[in-house]
Image (cartoon, rainbow, N blue to C red):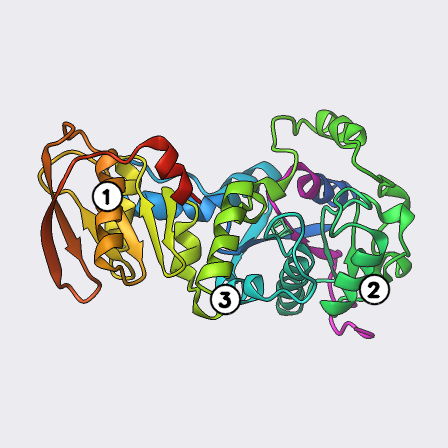
Amino acid sequence: MKDHPFSAINPKPKGIGLLSGGLDSILAVRLLQKQGIEVIGLMIETGFTTDYKWRQLQEANRESIPEAVPLSRQLSEILNIEIVVTDISRSFFQMVLNPRFGYGKFVNPCIDCRILMLQSARELMLERKADFVFTGEVISQRPMTQFRSTLAQTEKDACLEGYLLRPLSAKLLEPTIPEKEGKIDRSRLEAIVGRSRSRQLELAKLWDLTGIAPAGGGNCQLISPEYSKRMRDLFNNKGKHHIHAEDSLLLGFGRHFRLSPYVKLVVSRNAQEHNLLLDKNKHFTLLEMPDITGAAALIDGETTELELHLAARILGRYSKAEANADIRFLLTRTDGSTIDFEEKAFPIDASELSNYLI
Ligand code: SF4
C-alpha cells in the first residue's frame, strides 16, 4: 500500500487494534491511548476459539449453562473503546485445511492466520477511515509468527506495508508511515524483544491491568495437543476434501474412537456434551441407549454390522447397565430412519478400548 487516502482527515490519529484478548494487545492499546490516539478494537472469530466452543455448548444447554459475558464486551469496558467482532470462520476453515505457509508444532497455521486477520483489520481501517493498524506482537516472542522476517511477510501479504504498527517492539522496527508523519510519537513506544515478559508485567502493574491472561493464543484450539491429534486423524482417514466445519467443531468435545479408516465414534463425557451431540445429529448418525442412563454417541461414516456392535459395546461401557444385562440401543440416521437393537452389556475392557482411542 503506497498511499493511504484517509490519513489526512482525522482530527486526531485513529488506529485499528487487532485484539486477541491477551495482555500484549491490551498493553498496545494502552500505549497508544496514553498519547491521545483513538483506538477501535477488532476481535476475530475464527471458529476455532475456546469461546466459540463454549457458545456451542451453551446453545445446546440453554437451561443449565448461563450465557457468559463475551470477551469483547469485557475488553471494551476495561479499555473504554469500541470493539468490532468479525466472523471469518468460513474462510478460516478453508485456510486451516490448506495453509500456504504450513502448520506449526500442532495444526496451527499461524502465519496464514495472521495474514487473514490483518486483511480483516485493513478492511476495517479503510471502512472507518483510520490511519493505521496495530497489533500486540513482540519480536521473537513466538516461534512461528514473530521473527522479523515473518512480521515483514505478514505485513506485505496483508497489503499493509508501512501502515502496520507493533507498539511493543516499534523502536526496534522500521518506522511506519504514521510515525514518519508525526501522528504517532515513536519515542513513547516500546522496544520489547523475546519471550521474557518482565516489561509487559511492569507495564500491566503500572496501568492496573494485572489479572489478564498473558497471551491470547491460549484461546485457540489449534494449539491444543489433543485437538491437533484428532484433526490429524481426520486428515489421514477422512481426507481434507471431505472434512466439514461440523467435523472440526466436534473435535473439541467427547471421547473419540477410530473404528476403521471410514468410521469414527464420538462418545459424550457428560450431560452437557450429551445434549450437544443430540443437537448435531443432522450431520452424523446418533447412537443412544434410550432405556438407561448413559452417554450418547455420534457415528461418522457407514458402519458394517461388526462395527455397529463394536460401537454399541464401547458406548455400553459408559452406561449404568449391569454387566451381562441386555441394553437396548437406538440408531438414528441423518435421514431419520432408525434401527432398534439389543446388545449384551459386556463392557469392552480398557486395553482393547485404548486400541481405538484417538
Ligand atoms: S495460535 Fe491460533 S489464533 Fe493464534 S496465530 Fe496461531 S492459528 Fe492464529
Magenta stretch in the rendered image: 1-26
Give the x, y percent position of residue 55: 39, 46
- The amino acid pointed to by label 3 is Lys
Q: Which mark is residue 296?
A: 1
Which secondary structure lies at badge 2? Answer: loop
Please give the name of the residue rendered at 12% of the width and 59% of the height, measured from the top-left corner: 338
Q: Which is nearer the N-term, disc 2 or disc 3?
A: 2
Give the x, y percent position of residue 192: 84, 39
Which secondary structure lies at badge 3? Answer: helix
In this orientation, which residue lies closer to the viewer: 158 or 177? 158
- The amino acid pointed to by label 1 is Ala
Distance, label 1 to label 3, CA atoms, is 27 Å
Which residue is labeled 3 in the image? 240
The answer to whether residue 101 is above or below residue 20 is below
Which quarter of the image is occupied by the N terminus? bottom right
In this orientation, which residue lies closer to the viewer: 299 or 309? 309
Give the x, y percent position of residue 256: 38, 45
Q: Which mark is residue 286?
A: none
In this orientation, which residue lies closer to the viewer: 262 or 240? 262
Give the x, y percent position of residue 228: 54, 48
Please give the name of the residue rendered at 18% of the width and 46% of the height, measured from the top-left corner: 288
Magenta: main secondary structure: loop
Distance, label 2 to label 3, CA atoms, is 36 Å
- Which image quadrant for residue 255? top left
Question: Mark 1 against mark 2, which lies toward the viewer?
Answer: 1
- The amino acid pointed to by label 2 is Gly
Which residue is labeled 2 in the image? 162
Q: Are marks 2 and 3 in contact (CB under 8 Å)?
A: no
Left or right of 230, for residue 199: right
The answer to whether residue 5 is above or below residue 272 is below
